[in-house]
Amino acid sequence: MADDTTTPRADGGAGGAGGAGGAGERTVTMRLWRGDASGGDFVDYVLPAVEGEVVLDVVHRVQADLAPDLACRWNCKAGKCGSCSTEINGEPRLMCMTRMDTLPPDEVVTVAPMKTFPVLRDLVTDVSYNYEVAKRIPPFNPRPKTDDEVAAGGYRMQQIDVERSQEFRKCIECYLCQDVCHVIRDHEENKTAYAGPRFFARSAELEMHPLDATDRRELLQEEQGLNKCNITKCCTEVCPEHIKITDNAIIPLKERVVDARYDPVAWLGRKILRRTKGTAAEAAATAPAHGPAAVQPEVEVTGTPGPQHR
Amino acid sequence: MPEIESHDVDVVVIGAGGAGLRAAIEAKARGLRVALVCKSLLGKAHTVMAEGGAAAALGNVYPEDNWQVHFRDTMRGGKMLNNWRMAQLHAQEAPDRIRELEEWGALFDRTKDGLILQRDFGGHRYARLAHIGDRTGLELIRTLQQKAVADGVEVFMELKVLRLLHDDSGAVAGLVGYWRPSGSFVSFTTKAVVLATGGVGKSWKYTSNSWESTGDGHAMAVWAGADMIDMEAVQFHPTGMVWPLSVRGILVTEGVRGDGGVLRNAEGRRFMFDYIPPMFAAETADSEEEADKWYADHSAGRRPPELLPRDEVARSINSEVKAGRGSPHGGVFLDIASRRSAEDIRRRLPSMYHQFKELAGVDITVEAMEVGPTCHYIMGGVRVDADTTATTVPGLFAAGEVAGGMHGSNRLGGNSLSDLLVFGRRAGMGAADYVEGRSGSASVDRAAMEEVVRAATAPFERESGENPYDVQHDLQETMQSLVGIIRTGSELEEAMGKLEELEERAANVAVAGGPQYNPGWNLATDLPSMLTVSRCTTQGAIHRTESRGGHTRDDYPAPDAELGKVNFVQRVPAGGARSGGAVGTPSIRSITITPEPLPVMPDELQALFDEEAH
Ligand SMILES: Cc1cc2nc3c(=O)[nH]c(=O)nc-3n(C[C@H](O)[C@H](O)[C@H](O)COP(=O)(O)OP(=O)(O)OC[C@H]3O[C@@H](n4cnc5c(N)ncnc54)[C@H](O)[C@@H]3O)c2cc1C
Ligand code: SF4
Ligand code: SF4
Ligand code: FES
């Protein structure tokens, strides 16, 4: 029943599609991938168009009315949990944040599972690769509190110092960036030695974390395949949280690794430099950090970066 | 009978939201074998959606804040129905739990002195909410998730637990569930179980909750013979989005009203002036001119009626819609566009601006929003001992939204995230103490296990039967229209009748396809929980013949001082589900309800309220 007399409109903008009003019921055709690890194919489902829906709503209506066993993941329906990642008309996107009226009107909407991960069923993929990579990232390792901090009851960090890592902590782990990255999308064999953009961002977050005291550079280069990324920026383009993965995480990591490879003194220098830049008031606030109590923990970790990770 | 994979551990934590993660970390730190089980992928639990912050009297912004003030705010917010000891522990321990997150890598927004910044919220006397922009829940869950993984907690994700199993003594000693991806069955024998399964909102049509909030933990506790309290206490947030479909129920923060937004009906009238209850008349403005002065200078006029307590506002919206003065899609208008400059709105409410722009195609700097009450949170839940989180069933512990008592009849914003941390940790400790004090290994009856599996797979066997989505739909309609924000005796009785019909229909659903990642089947296995919880809420609502906090009775509009001294306790009588590992279908129709006195607050805490009276 896919008689789509496609009359492409010049505008793909809001307000175009939707609305069951006017003469005759408007319909939408959803072309959904159905199948499992052993294979499958696209199946078309035709439903009445309903104003204001997102792709996930239409998929839910397919479940309720036409195919109760259609598999898809979702949780929050508000772009906050990163569960509903799929490829919509070929683009890696969240189903809950893709409004039907932003897609070309009167054209079939194709929804496929993420290509980089093995299919479990229908739109659901096995994303366990990502959880495995996460386990191999050396955990957060804070320096001890200074005397002042013990008295104040908590660490002192300036807003300006936490902001860089906060950008990466916006990540909702949708894995769309992992899906789009050609290093693993086109080369299954790379998965064993490649962390991928999501986890480069995680390492950058820890590297730039004002409290973390672990040197992660050798691991990034030797085991996580940082050098395999050739900065195509595809990951940044698909990130629903608009995290600048390439510019703010990957490139600075590459610089750190290449510039001062295995040079603990340069690494330490950068950490201290970062911690003391800013306004005069902040400089004053962090001044005690130069005292013996605070420098000590940072010196401790500069020894041999390697063994700590294993 | 399908094969049942089996595991043997010391503690199973069911739920990987804030409460479950925190419990697992604590039990793991005690050197126990801990399994953390959740229905979704790790990191996706409902906690991830929380925005505003976590309440803790850190005193970073107002040094005069302390646990006593937080305690008092919490009790008053809950209309004194709270378990005082839980409220006390919560207020005392929340600051340490927040600081601990920082030691595990969380990056809260900072004060000028470099400490954790705190923001104002309704019902809290001082700025008290530690936050990270408007994504505090994400920070909380990610920090705990990373810590749990680093500590080696074993995670079983996309595994739905169906039932708890008992040993011969009546203690909880195991459970059965299935892997959602494969549909294959799994059992655990365990010395203790921590329930951290979150809320129940999915039984209502309009809710801010995700598909996971089907009340599985509440229901499993009932079936296991545990006591439940205050199940009628459900919070409806007055402003959820109502249109378009895609966003129905999603929260619109109270901040919109705090920043000058007003509610209007279809005639454009600021109707809240028509609904000022006598109790608040003295402190509420009675003209638009007076109300509008308040925003800039709180001493220039009295508070606008749009900022009355949540239950008052939700009730008023309801009345306007019923009177035929609602918006086209059954809500009212929340208008900030005509009141603040576009620049101001974008600066102060960035996430709301973004939410309406991306999801509704509405520019809130130009147009009014359509809003209506949405089912948000359940204050009632499993009755627990405040210090250990032990339920009334040996071996069973509960923390987070599934546990009752902490929030009384109404929860303050921000008190849930801190509740998860404080009582999640205590649940881990309570379970660990119990396991260490227990001798022998856990054992459950194989036949009981098989019975659960048989019941779960029955929908595949039926040749014909109803679509589970239709039953869910009718349940949501029933709860929304009859056990919603405003309740009345006759409608509640009608709801009880409908629930009985739905129970029969749910027992006869049929599902298509196989067991692998089959949402239709998954829903069929959620229906018994949703129906059990709905029954508890409805029964509780029938018995609480007063209006208090989140529970509003049209036919009993005032609070009743005598009922303010009791919890309504529900349970399946012993000898039912509980004895000797028997399972079967526990008859939820045998649930009893009795008023039992609240725990008595010690004098020194009572004095905090007496002082205030003078
Ligand atoms: C939009 C929104 C905003 C909010 N904002 C705030 C805020 O700013 N501050 C605040 O304090 N509170 C807020 N809340 C409330 C708060 O987020 C929740 O009450 C809290 O997150 C509940 O946490 P939890 O750990 O109890 O359960 P959840 O986070 O709901 O997790 C439940 C877990 O149990 C698992 N589970 C359930 N059933 C089963 C089963 N049968 N088998 C296996 N696993 C199961 C689920 O998979 C999940 O992992 C907000 C709520 C909403 C909806
Ligand atoms: S920039 Fe690097 S990480 Fe990102 S998609 Fe391209 S190759 Fe992959
Ligand atoms: S970095 Fe962006 S695209 Fe990648 S997982 Fe996180 S939110 Fe998704
Ligand atoms: S459902 Fe949470 S991001 Fe789409």
Image (cartoon, helix red, strand yellow):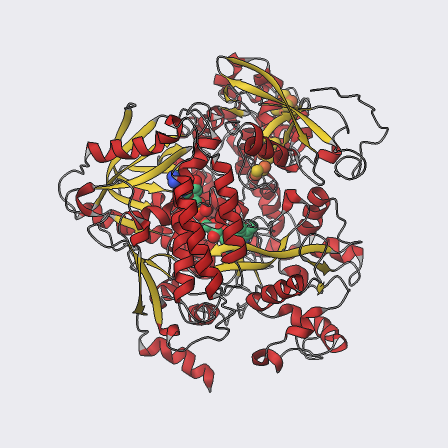
Between A290 and A132, the residue placed more toward the observer is A132
Q: Position of residue B490 (x, y in %)?
A: 47, 64
Please name the residue shown 32% across and 79% down the image. B603
Between B416 and A181, the residue placed more toward the observer is B416
Which quarter of the rendered image does ligand 3 occupy? top right
Toward the left, the furthest residue is: B440
Please name the residue shown 51% across and 45% down the image. B474
Pick the quarter of the image with the C terminus of chain A. Answer: top left
Q: Position of residue A165 (x, y in %)?
A: 58, 41
Image quadrant of residue B287? bottom right
Between A214 and B487, the residue placed more toward the observer is B487
Toward the right, the furthest residue is: A10
Please name the residue shown 16% across and 46% down the image. B438
Q: Is residue A146 above or below residue A203?
A: below
- Horizontal relation, residue A45 to residue A207: left or right: right
| Picture mark count | 0
Q: State whether residue B132 appears in this view.
A: yes
- Horizontal relation, residue A14 to residue B205: left or right: right
Q: State whether residue A288 appears in this view.
A: no
Q: Position of residue A41 (x, y in %)?
A: 58, 15
Please name the residue shown 39% across and 61% down the image. B540
- Horizontal relation, residue A294 to residue A48: left or right: left
Between B472 and B65, the residue placed more toward the observer is B472
Pick the quarter of the image with the N terminus of chain A. Answer: top right
Image quadrant of residue A241? top right
Q: Position of residue B458 (x, y in %)?
A: 35, 30
